[in-house]
Image (cartoon, rainbow, N blue to C red):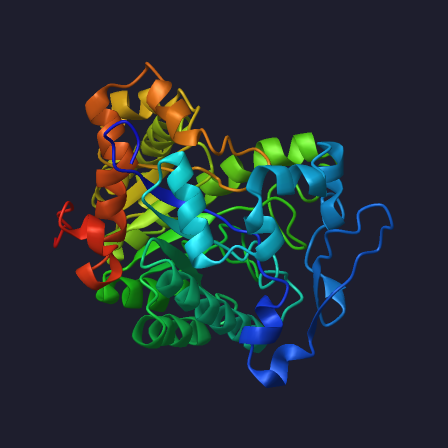
Amino acid sequence: MKDGYKVFDADAHVVYPADLWSRFLDKKYVDRVGTKQPFNDFDHYNPTTVDGRHTHHPTMLYGQFQKLMEWTADDIVAKYGELMTKGFTGERVAKALTVDGVDMAVIYGPEFDMWSDFLDPEMQAAMARAYNRWGQEMRESSNNRVHISSPVPIFDVSRAVEEITYAYEHLGARSFWTRPNTYRGRNLGDSYYDPIWEVLQDLDCAFGTHEFMGLKGVSYGHDRYTSFTEWHTAVHQMEGMGACLSMIVHGVFERFPRLRVAYMESGCGWLPSWLHRIDEHLELAGPEFPDLTMNATEYFQRNCWISSECEDKFVSDVVRWLGNDHIVYESDFPHPDSKYPHTVEHFLGMDVINAEDKRKILWDNAIDLYRFSPEFMPPELLEQTAVPTV
């Protein structure tokens, strides 16, 4: 809590334990995952390999952008203390977030390891299950303060549905996500993914998209930029916009009217203009998508959420044009551009939205998006929170 506001961090991250895959993968897959640091001048970061191949793109590979920012190992330890020296365990992450005023959080990851286009579907599904086992440990050790959004292995839709169901029934996963990129030539609006939306709707679980610059695969800018500045400026927003467009016009929300989807870490100021542009094109060329019964703005206001970082003053434009009901808050903890431990302070200090907007964005809207049942809420917060049932 901060200055009387409860805070739900709808999109946070961690530094993963070195033994994440070796400890949680089924034994038959463990030998396929390793680490390799090809540069001698950045030895504290050893990125993951799968089948001997790096999962990061060369532009940001092996900590190169951290070097550019002069974000050293000493800097990280100075800022995050025992989190870095002893590990980002559930109880430590919950304690660290409390310093910032955050009461509970949802972690998005893994950023790269299970998404590279050279992975086979079986391995991707195995990595999803391993990550979800780790996520169960995080949630339980944090007393429900730190949840994960469970990664959906979308290379094979049947495996994806199987892993969603397993994670929900056996590992306590109540939120799911994937990267917004195209895979095997498919956008997220492709009807191939309908079984995923069906099971998520039936389970009443939120789904999110989240970009992370640097995938060794297809993402916006991978083939046109070679600098961190260019790629990182563009990729999060462009991929979020692309996923939103595809899912709306190809009827995902028409076919699955109770599906809840959030577009994370893509900024938010673009949203009103983007929805207006989609609406204009649907009006102009409506016969292309004859099954839609609503316009893009209406679908978004019913089914979708957008996240705001702590200094994004363009959140006021979203409130002005779309209302304050479908915006959630994110800290981006503990990435280099996060303002931790002052993210909530910065957000509360913005004068472009009022106190009621801030209250809803910091807490109520995330409660509405995720809709965790009582057994998945921190006990001390449960009695203060009305969890939506519809």
Q: Position of residue 350 (x, y in %)?
A: 36, 18
Q: Is residue 90 left or right of residue 366?
A: right
Q: Is residue 36 left or right of residue 219?
A: right
Q: Position of residue 110 (x, y in %)?
A: 54, 58
Q: Position of residue 128 (x, y in %)?
A: 49, 69
Foreground pick, 237 / 247? 237
Q: Position of residue 287 (x, y in %)?
A: 32, 44
Foreground pick, 304 / 137? 137
Q: Is residue 294 left or right of residue 138?
A: left
Q: Residue at x 73, y 32 (%)?
A: 70
**Quarter where residue 98 is shown:** top left
Q: Residue at x 14, y 45 (%)?
A: 384
Foreground pick, 371 / 123? 371
Q: Quadrant of the N terminus?
A: top left
Q: Is residue 231 left or right of residue 338?
A: right
Q: Residue at x 47, y 37 (%)?
A: 266
In the image, is residue 317 above or below residue 252?
above
